[in-house]
């Protein structure tokens, strides 16, 4: 049995994921818990190069090309960083997006079959790298975009952010469907609530699941 704990954060544009991950990392530090924070796409030198292509390349990319690039980045990140970290007792691996993003964006919202995404994802990451817990910060596209456009002008949006409302509506519906399919793993949080309300829900669910897992593996949390 692997000894660490993998928690991933997912959600659509403007859902407040970055703010929550920042607060969560600070909280882990204050609790003196041992963690590593990774982002997808990215997280390795190769992954950051792929991220640049995915978000800023001028060419139109098909869902298939996008997904294969995400998968190449993911495969490297999982073998070089995620799995070795999960071998460390009590280590918490925090992922800012993971393979659920591919199901939501390239599958439900894009053109790929979910079965194909599943097959290639299994091939890319192998066994033993599934999240123990996934937070889905659920928010409507309109609310997310109105939050985002307060901070950035539309011309600064990256390639994926620029896809329209119907694409992002399908991302949201896709995530909710994934949460239904994987009830044990997902925790859906209403991201229209205040930052503090969302955060306190995240922390209490995390503590419950982490303590449970560490108790099972014989390592008590601090
Ligand atoms: P990022 O700047 O990290 O955005 P966010 O703050 O929303 O996480 O950009 C990542 C973008 O890549 C985001 O629009 C979601 C998209 N994405 C996919 O389409 N498929 C994937 O598998 C992953 C990991 C991300």
Image (cartoon, rainbow, N blue to C red):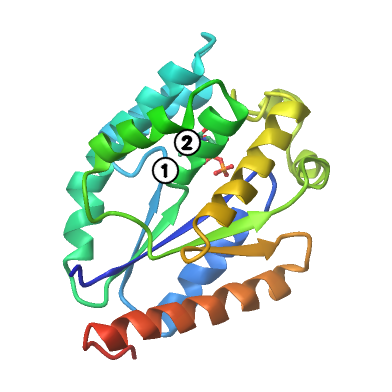
Looking at the image, residue 88 lies above or below residue 68: below
Instruction: Give the residue drawn at x 72%, y 75%.
Output: 197
Q: Which residue is mark 2?
A: 102
In front here: 77 or 117?
117
Instruction: Give the residue drawn at x 58%, y 72%.
Output: 202
Q: Quadrant of residue 118?
A: top left
Total marks in image:
2
The percent coordinates of residue 188 (x first, y second) are: 62, 62
Looking at the image, residue 200 lies above or below residue 129: below
Q: How many other residues sit within 10 Å of disc 1, few (<14), some (14-19) or many (≥20)?
A: many
Q: Secondary structure at mark 2?
A: helix
The percent coordinates of residue 124 (x first, y second) are: 26, 36
Looking at the image, residue 135 lies above or below residue 222: above
In front here: 104 or 157?
104
Image side of residue 130 versus residue 80, left or right: right
In front here: 112 or 61?
112
Whether residue 32 is visible to the viewer of this picture, yes or no, is: no
The percent coordinates of residue 116 (x first, y second) are: 39, 28
Q: Residue furthest top?
A: 59
In front here: 31 or 210?
210
Q: Quadrant of residue 76?
A: top left
Q: Is mark 2 within 8 Å of ligand 1?
A: yes
Q: Is mark 1 within 8 Å of ligand 1?
A: yes
Instruction: Give the residue drawn at x 56%, y 69%.
Output: 23
Q: Which residue is mark 1?
A: 99
């Amino acid at each position: 049995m692997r000894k660490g704990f993998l928690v991933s954060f997912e959600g659509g544009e403007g859902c407040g994921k970055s703010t929550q991950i920042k607060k969560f990392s600070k909280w882990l530090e204050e609790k003196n818990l041992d963690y590593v924070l990774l982002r997808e796409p990215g997280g390795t030198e190769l992954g950051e190069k792929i991220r640049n292509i995915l978000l800023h390349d001028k060419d139109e990319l098909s869902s298939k090309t996008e997904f294969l690039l995400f998968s190449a980045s993911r495969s490297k990140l999982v073998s070089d960083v995620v799995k070795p970290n999960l071998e460390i007792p009590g280590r918490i691996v925090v992922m800012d997006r993971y393979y659920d993003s591919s199901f939501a964006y390239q599958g439900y919202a894009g053109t790929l079959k979910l079965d194909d995404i599943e097959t290639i994802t299994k091939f890319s990451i192998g066994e033993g790298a599934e999240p123990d817990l996934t937070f889905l910060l659920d928010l409507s596209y309109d609310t997310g975009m109105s939050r985002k456009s307060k901070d950035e002008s539309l011309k600064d949006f990256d390639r994926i952010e620029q896809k329209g409302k119907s694409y992002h509506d399908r991302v949201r519906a896709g995530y909710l469907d994934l949460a239904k399919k994987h009830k044990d793993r997902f925790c859906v949080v209403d991201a229209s609530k205040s930052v503090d309300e969302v955060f306190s829900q995240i922390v209490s669910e995390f503590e419950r699941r982490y303590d449970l897992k560490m108790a099972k593996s014989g390592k008590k949390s601090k």
